[in-house]
Image (tube, rainbow, N blue to C red):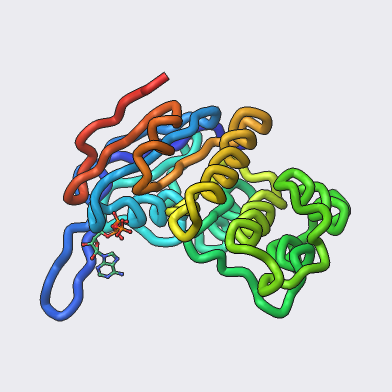
């Protein structure tokens, strides 16, 4: 169980073609598991970079991230991979579903070659039900709407019951109505399953419905408000 995340003095620079981009600088933030946090800011302000560092997909240039006081930098690669599997679920703008697999198989995919204490198929069916797709378990991604595909992607992110859901523009490719459905599903998971949510979005209406809104600009946090 992981209940808090702390980012301390985080910096991230990318070097390429002789140019150095400071994607993140001086980031100090804490997150608590019950919270639904929206992260907003202009394109290039560092939102995705922050999420990828918190999600252990990349490493900071300096500073550190700790989960419940344990620094990610102190873990070995294999430990980090296991940690990610156990505690973190991701949803991206692109759904990244495997086109030749059914909804059910896509949801079960993260469990492949993992030992888990539950029945994989039953668990996958349960999370598909949570996102309202129990009647689509045998459909291929190409037979689903964009909103439905994103619901499969959410089910896949939730299949191992993560403590944290990291959503990077999860509604960015969807029309307003489908985006609302996705947002509502994620908000329900947050309140019912107590899953901490970090929700990167360009949509200020959606962001205003989060418990807390973090605004970023030029790689820094410009405000971090608790809305309600
Ligand atoms: N792999 C990379 N190599 C070089 N520069 C990168 C890389 N990834 C991100 N950047 C740069 O880091 C900065 C922050 O990018 P990031 O994707 O985090 O911003 P963002 O706020 O998520 O933007 P958007 O809203 O457009 O997705 C940008 O200047 C970007 O060009």
Q: Is 97 on the left-hand or right-hand side of 65?
A: right
Looking at the image, the residue that sits furthest to the top is 228
- The quarter of the image holding the N terminus is top right
- Count of numbered marks: 0
Q: Is 119 on the left-hand or right-hand side of 150?
A: right
Q: Quarter-wise, where is residue 138 in the image? A: bottom right
- The quarter of the image holding the C terminus is top left
Q: Residue at x 31, y 26 (%)?
A: 225
- Counting from the top left corner in percent of width and height, residue 192 is at 67, 29
Viewer-side residue, 19 vs 178 = 178
Q: Is 23 on the left-hand or right-hand side of 35?
A: left
Viewer-side residue, 85 vs 175 = 175
Q: Residue at x 74, y 44 (%)?
A: 130
Q: Quarter-wise, where is residue 113 in the image? A: bottom right
- Counting from the top left corner in percent of width and height, residue 20 is at 14, 67
Q: Residue at x 34, y 48 (%)?
A: 202
Q: Residue at x 50, y 65 (%)?
A: 94
Looking at the image, the residue that sits furthest to the left is 18
- Counting from the top left corner in percent of width and height, residue 2 is at 57, 36
Viewer-side residue, 5 vs 41 = 41
Placement of 130 over or under 43, stated as above or below: above
Q: Is 223 on the left-hand or right-hand side of 108?
A: left
- Counting from the top left corner in percent of width and height, residue 139 is at 78, 68
């Amino acid at each position: 169980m992981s209940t808090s995340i702390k980012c301390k003095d985080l910096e991230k620079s990318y070097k390429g073609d002789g140019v150095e981009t400071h994607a993140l600088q001086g980031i100090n933030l804490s997150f608590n598991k019950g919270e639904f946090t929206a992260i907003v800011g202009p394109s290039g302000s560092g939102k995705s970079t922050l999420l990828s560092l918190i999600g252990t997909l990349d490493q900071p240039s300096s500073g550190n991230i700790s989960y419940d006081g344990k620094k990610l930098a102190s873990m070995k690669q294999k430990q980090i991979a296991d940690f990610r599997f156990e505690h973190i679920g991701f949803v991206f703008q692109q759904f990244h579903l495997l086109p030749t697999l059914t909804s059910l198989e896509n949801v079960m995919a993260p469990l492949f070659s993992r030992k888990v204490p539950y029945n994989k198929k039953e668990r996958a069916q349960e999370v598909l039900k949570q996102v309202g797709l129990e009647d689509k378990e045998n459909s291929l991604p190409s037979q689903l709407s964009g909103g439905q595909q994103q619901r499969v992607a959410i089910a896949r992110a939730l299949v191992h019951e993560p403590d944290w859901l990291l959503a990077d523009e999860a509604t960015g490719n969807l029309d307003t109505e489908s985006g609302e459905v996705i947002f509502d599903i994620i908000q329900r998971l947050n309140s019912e399953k107590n899953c901490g949510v970090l929700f990167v979005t360009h949509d200020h209406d959606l962001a205003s419905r989060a418990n807390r809104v973090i605004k970023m600009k030029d790689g820094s946090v410009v405000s971090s408000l608790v809305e309600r």
